[in-house]
Amino acid sequence: MEPATQTAPAQGLPGLDRVPPIGLVLGGITSIQFGAALAATLFDDLGPAGTSVLRLGFAAIILMALFRPRVRSYSPRALRLVAVFGLTLGAMNLCFYEALDRIPLGVAVTIEFAGPLGVAVATSRRRLDLVWAACAAVGILLLSNPFGAGIDTIGLILALAAAAMWAAYILIAQRATAHFQGSDGLALAMVMGALVPLIPGVVEAGATLLEPQWLAIGAGVALMSSVIPYSLETEALRRLPTSVFGVLMSIEPAVAAFAGFLVLGQSLGARELVAIGFVVAASVGVSRTAAPAPAAPEA
């Protein structure tokens, strides 16, 4: 769920105040999942690490140009925090793309949702949320199918690693918003995040990264996966209760499965669809009963 971490002071794009907030959330979800599907089409030529370099690199350039953070106005402590913030973001994106290279998009996003779900349950005092956690665990167990022909083991591990990074990202974002104005923290974090896949991406893709057609598609992935959903969701958070926002975001795994089918030709069987349903139900349940943490960029 790569969007928003910022609170109300964050800037959105002009004119978004005239769009219904539910439409903004749905637009952000659609943009990020089809952006992920578009990114997967680059893996054969650039590899997942090379694709991550372009996605995070262009996102950093665009966000820095939009928000122009003044680095010298922040303390060394705040800059150290944003460095950790960005490294977590970069690791999350790289792990997610590496997982996506091995397992279907809908499955990868569903497993990754364990991250924010875990944070929501861990910070909740409601016993009912333990039921939702168990529901999500059943869904992930069904996806892994340990007693049959399950999904790629390395892909599963990488998706779980992305989930752990997402959980860490949410917790770090809560601290970062106290130190940075508006969207400065996210822009600076994206610069740090772009460094994470740089070496493996250059090794994997080499000079191919600089070919015009891949640069153009990489910029499109950055817009669809970072800039557009971030802007839409930040604006939506100004006008929607966080519980409603969380429920709407819960449909992401289903949208990811649809994007994977439409763009990548990835069809899912009954077991996978039931498993996604379990995780979506758990996410809806947690969003309605727990005090949700701030939304954070998805990988």
Image: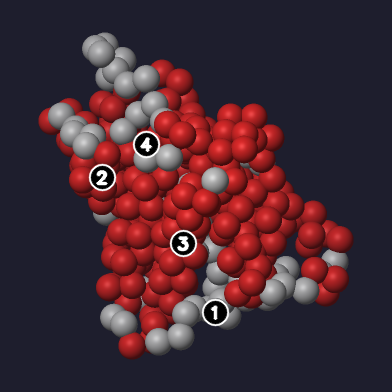
Identify which amino acid the numbered label 2 is placed on: Val
SS class, disc 1: loop
Q: Nearer the viewer, mark 1 or mark 3?
A: 3
Residue 99 pos. (x, y %): 44, 31
Q: CA distance from mark 1 to mark 2?
A: 31 Å
Q: Residue at x 52, y 51 (%)?
A: 212
Q: Is residue 180 left or right of residue 89?
A: right
Identify which amino acid the numbered label 1 is placed on: Gln
Between residue 42 and residue 289, name the one nearer to us.
42
- Is 157 drawn above or below residue 267 in the view shown? above
Task: Mark 1 or mark 3: name the one nearer the start of the chain.
Answer: 1
Asked whether residue 257 is in view, the answer is no
Identify which amino acid the numbered label 3 is placed on: Leu
Residue 9 pos. (x, y %): 58, 80
Q: Residue at x 32, y 77 (%)?
A: 21
Identify which amino acid the numbered label 4 is placed on: Ala
Residue 12 pos. (x, y %): 49, 78
Q: Residue at x 41, y 18 (%)?
A: 153
Please give the label number shown on residue 263: 2
Q: CA distance from mark 4 to mark 3?
A: 21 Å
